[in-house]
Image (cartoon, rainbow, N blue to C red):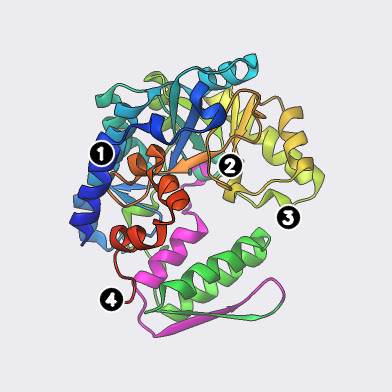
Amino acid sequence: MQTLRSNCFRLISCAWPESVTERGKERYGFIDIIMTHGVHSAGMLRHGLPPPSSTSLASFRSNLESLARTREVISLSTAVAILEEGRRPMRRYGVLTFDDSLACTCRVAIPEVLRVGIPATVFVSTDILDTGEPYWWLRLDHAWRQARTEQASFFGPKGEVVVIRRDDPASMARAKDHLRAMRANQRDHEVGQVEEAFGARLSNPDVNYPYAEAMTWADVRELAAKEIEIGSHTVTHPNLELLTRDEVIQELGDSKRRIELKLGLPCRSFCYPYGKHSPDVTDLVRAAGYKCATSTIAPGRNFAGQDAFLLQRYSITTEPYKLGYDLSGFSRMLKYCGWRSEVHTCLRGHRAK
């Protein structure tokens, strides 16, 4: 079924004329910003199953192919300049971005980007680069994948008991929602409780889980030398909506200064951790000296006049050629024709199985 879906996505991506489904201002051009997190190679699989946020190299290649074939891929800074001019883009542009400072980005994904010959932006969290400590959700994913018990629990942000079951991915997704709503100290404590309950800690010296390995500053300098743009993803990757004004200012300013000091280059772009932001946070990003900011919420395309600090993005998924399918507008046509439910059941597969 997955092969059939991938072939359908590829066929639509390659053959569907986008002009059929473009509406209104889309006919005058737009900018599609694409995001991804981890990208894993086949060799990494011997160390265990990848986290849900990671995309296989094969899928990344096929989706990258769709992007390069259907869009004129430009840098994020060039895209922002076009939007700020206020004129219609007049073309279908694409921008490629990576979040989270993961080592697999520079070791697995970027070589493919350079091979295709397109620009990209990598958003880094400076504390991760300084310490090498893995992100909390990757600690959680590892504990869940390697669980020695049937379930684990922790206290949510309001004191509620949250249960994660080893055989229930939905319970893991709900747990992450609860943890994102916590401040760092409480969250890290609760993740530690889950690791202990499942009997699997990423910090154990005998563990090799390459999906969680962080970049080093040497990696980032090498990316910059290859003309990959480096943006800020804060210092500690917090939910900025939970912080005080002074804490937000520190996260924004310290990360920007650290990147500029290490690279000797200006840091102009910012990415909201978890996609969380508010008007006050956005104002502080502007005041910190950034030129643009991206989000993971409300995926969509960007048009002339778009607020450069509320840029929308699409996501590369684990499905080969799914990005090209999403960008083609074919699914939107199905919605208008009333066929979306039936066709998507075929393309997505039967969830009950």
> How many discs mark residues in the rendered view?
4
For the residues labelled 4 and 2, the Cα–Cα distance comes to 34 Å
Q: Which residue is denoted by mark 3 in the rendering?
A: 242
Write the residue at 20% across / 48% down: 7
Q: Are marks 4 and 2 in contact (CB under 8 Å)?
A: no
What residue is at 61 percent from the left and 61 percent from the top? 180
Q: Earlier in the sequence, mark 4 or mark 2?
A: 2
At 75% from the left edge and 38% from the top edge, which residue is drawn? Answer: 249
Which structural element holds mark 1? helix
Measure the alpha-carbon separation of dots 3 and 1: 37 Å
Q: Residues within 10 Å of mark 2 (few under 14, many from 20)?
A: many
In the picture, measured across the screen, residue 159 lies left or right of residue 225, that is: right
Mark 1 or mark 4: whose residue is earlier in sequence: 1
Residue type marked 4: Lys
The amino acid on which the numbered mark 1 sits, given as a three-letter code, is Arg
Residue closest to the far front: 337
| Residue identifier under label 1 | 61
The residue that appears at 37% across and 79% down in the rendered structure is 167
Q: Amino acid at mark 3?
A: Leu
Q: Residue 124: x, y in percent?
A: 51, 38
**Residue 288 position in % (x across, y down):** 73, 29
Could you say which disc has been placed on residue 353 in the image? 4
Q: Which residues are drawn in magenta?
A: 129-158
Q: Residue 143 colored magenta? A: yes
Pick whichever of labels 1 and 2 is earlier in the sequence.
Answer: 1
Q: Nearer the viewer, residue 308 or 53?
A: 308
